[in-house]
Image: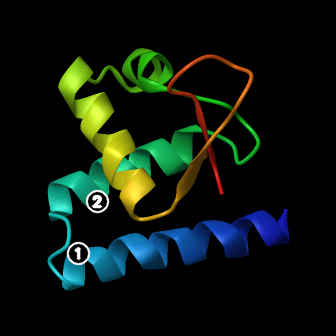
Amino acid sequence: LEFRRVLFRSLLEIVINAVEDKTISSTIAGNVKEVLETFAFDQIFGRKEIKSALHYGDYRAGSTIEIMHQLELIEPVKGHGKGKYRIK
């Protein structure tokens, strides 16, 4: 449990640094934070799951995944269908 808290804080630091570097906006950072808080580290998710859990639209869910991938917060998962990811 403590390991997960430390890992979560380090992922949030990456997001905060990206906002400070103006790589992403604070709005997008909020979306990323919501996804990190919603999905467990071993949970597999994609656009559909984000849309369902967070009531995001198609574009918002997809762009959040894209940003998370660019920041290397998530990794693609094989064997669960196209466009599925897990938090690194």
Q: Residue at x 19, y 26 (%)?
A: 59
Q: Residues within 10 Å of mark 2 (few under 14, many from 20)?
A: many
Colour mode?
A: rainbow
**Position of 15 relative to 57 (above/below):** below
The C terminus, quarter of image: bottom right
List the residue tagged with mark 1.
19
Q: Residue at x 20, y 84 (%)?
A: 21
Residue 72 in the image, given as x and y percentages of width and height: 49, 63
Which mark is drawn over residue 29?
2
Q: Amino acid at mark 2?
A: Ala
Q: Residue at x 76, y 64 (%)?
A: 4
Residue 74 in the image, given as x and y percentages of width and height: 55, 52
Q: Residue at x 14, y 77 (%)?
A: 22
Residue 76 in the image, given as x and y percentages of width and height: 59, 41
Q: Residues within 10 Å of mark 1 (few under 14, many from 20)?
A: some
Residue 68 appears anywhere in the view: yes
What is the CA distance from the residue labelled 1 to the residue labelled 2? Answer: 7 Å
Label 1 element class? helix
Q: Amino acid at mark 1?
A: Val
Residue 57 appears anywhere in the view: no
Q: Is residue 56 left or right of residue 83?
A: left
Q: Is residue 3 left or right of residue 40?
A: right
Q: Nearer the viewer, residue 50 or 5?
A: 50
